[in-house]
Amino acid sequence: MKVELPEEIVTFMQNLAAEITAQDNRATRSPYYYVVTGQLETAAPAGHGDARYYVPGSDAAYTEEALREHLKQCDADNETELNKPETDFDEFVAEHCEEYSAAYVDVEDNVFFTFKGYQRHMELNGHNYRRLKNVSSYIKYAGRNPEMDGLHKAIMAFAATAPETEEKTDVN
């Protein structure tokens, strides 16, 4: 069967296949894909999780370090209980603060065939990932997925048709 495709589609597929062939696969067997990965902060029971926050009265939420600093900066005339030498921080928190915790959950978002595609996406859309900590790329193996395996084979079929002398254009 012969299929006619527009020249821009053929060029795109040839460049995509060339980029996949040339890029670092991070020791992951084909077919593979890149994802945006990061950690999303979610609520956890008080005293559990990765982070603790303290809310004194109707004030904002503070980490332990931030609460200590906030209390130090309180007006000297408006002395807090914590500024008294006999008061322990844990006692102050128990008597005057609500405590809650947060846990960081690993999340994955979006899919890319190339690291270059991931980088371009992050340049244009990185601001949409501000809710995540430790944002990075991660490669996942897709060999047990027949659709991804077939798609990878179809893309790589264009690698053999790429002219050697033609200048390559960006896959994005």
Image (cartoon, rainbow, N blue to C red):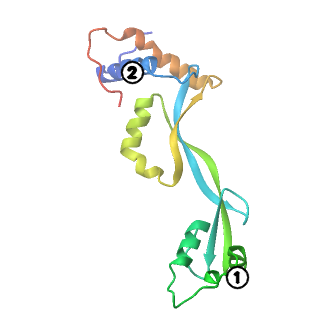
Comparing marks 1 and 2, which lies closer to the viewer? Answer: 1
Residue, x 68% and y 71% (percent of image)? 99
Name the residue carrying label 1: 86
Q: Which of marks 1 and 2 is nearer the N terminus?
A: 2
Name the residue carrying label 2: 13
Which label is found at residue 54? none
Looking at the image, residue 171 sits to the left or right of residue 99; the answer is left
Please count the marks in the image: 2
Looking at the rendered structure, the kind of residue marked 1 is Glu
Q: Where is residue 47 in the image (x, y as percent from the top left)?
A: 73, 64
SS class of the residue under badge 1? Answer: loop
Q: Position of residue 42 (x, y in %)?
A: 63, 58
Residue, x 36% and y 44% (percent of image)? 124
Q: Using a 10 Å C-alpha cutoff, classify the residue at mark 1 as few (fewer than 14 neighbours), some (14 to 19) or many (20 or more).
A: few
Looking at the rendered structure, the kind of residue marked 2 is Met
Q: Where is residue 172 in the image (x, y as percent from the top left)?
A: 35, 31
The answer to whether residue 73 of the structure is visible from this angle is yes
Q: In which quarter of the image is the N terminus?
A: top left
**Residue 88 drawn above or below residue 40:** below
Location of residue 72 (image quadrant)? bottom right
Please tell me which residue lies in front, 61 or 32: 61
How far is mark 1 from mark 2, CA to CA? 72 Å
Please tell me which residue lies in front, 149 or 45: 45
Location of residue 13 (image quadrant)? top left
Looking at the image, residue 158 sits to the left or right of residue 85; the answer is left
Q: Residue furthest front?
A: 85
**Residue 49 drawn above or below residue 46:** above
**Residue 132 drawn above or below residue 119:** below
Q: Where is residue 135 in the image (x, y as percent from the top left)?
A: 51, 45
The answer to whether residue 61 of the structure is visible from this angle is no
SS class of the residue under badge 2? Answer: helix
Please tell me which residue lies in front, 101 or 155: 101
